[in-house]
Image (spheres, grey):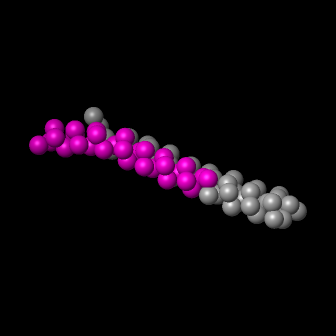
Amino acid sequence: MNNLAQVAAASNLPFALGIAALGVAIGLGLIGYAAMNGMARQPEAIGKMQTPMIIALAFVELVFLLTVFVGGASFKG
């Protein structure tokens, strides 16, 4: 039974990481879209918008990296 559980985990891990990557891609796209929209509406506020945008992008990317490392470490194939 333990071997069956390992096979199930091995087959689901790439699928789960793919879903996480898709979520991150959507999140990064939405952040970039909102920032570019705001910068186009108020060009004088570009300096004030860039820093929070980059911080938000870093947090979203961090979530994916944590998912990869924690997900990969949880599978001991």
The overriding secondary structure of the stretch rendered in magenta is helix
Can the viewer see residue 62?
no
Question: Which residue is rendered at x = 45% and y = 50% of the image?
Answer: 20
Q: Is residue 47 left or right of residue 17?
A: right
The quadrant in which the C terminus is found is: top left
Residue 63, placed above or below residue 49: above
Magenta stretch, residue numbers:
1-29
Give coordinates of residue 43: x percent, y percent: 86, 61
Does residue 25 belong to the magenta stretch?
Answer: yes
Question: Which residue is rendered at x = 16% and y = 38% of the image?
Answer: 3
Front one among 71 and 11: 11
Q: Is residue 61 left or right of residue 72?
A: right
Residue 34, placed above or below residue 16: below
Total tally of numbered discs in the picture: 0
Front one among 10 and 38: 38
Give coordinates of residue 52: x percent, y percent: 71, 60
Does residue 49 belong to the magenta stretch?
Answer: no
Front one among 49 and 26: 26
The quadrant in which the N terminus is found is: top left
Quadrant housing residue 46:
bottom right
Q: Is residue 65 left or right of residue 54?
A: left
Can the viewer see residue 6?
yes
Which residue reaches farthest right? Answer: 44
Give coordinates of residue 10: x percent, y percent: 28, 39
Which residue reaches farthest top? Answer: 77
Question: Which residue is rendered at x = 60% and y = 52% of the image?
Answer: 28
Question: Which residue is rendered at x = 67% and y = 54% of the image?
Answer: 32
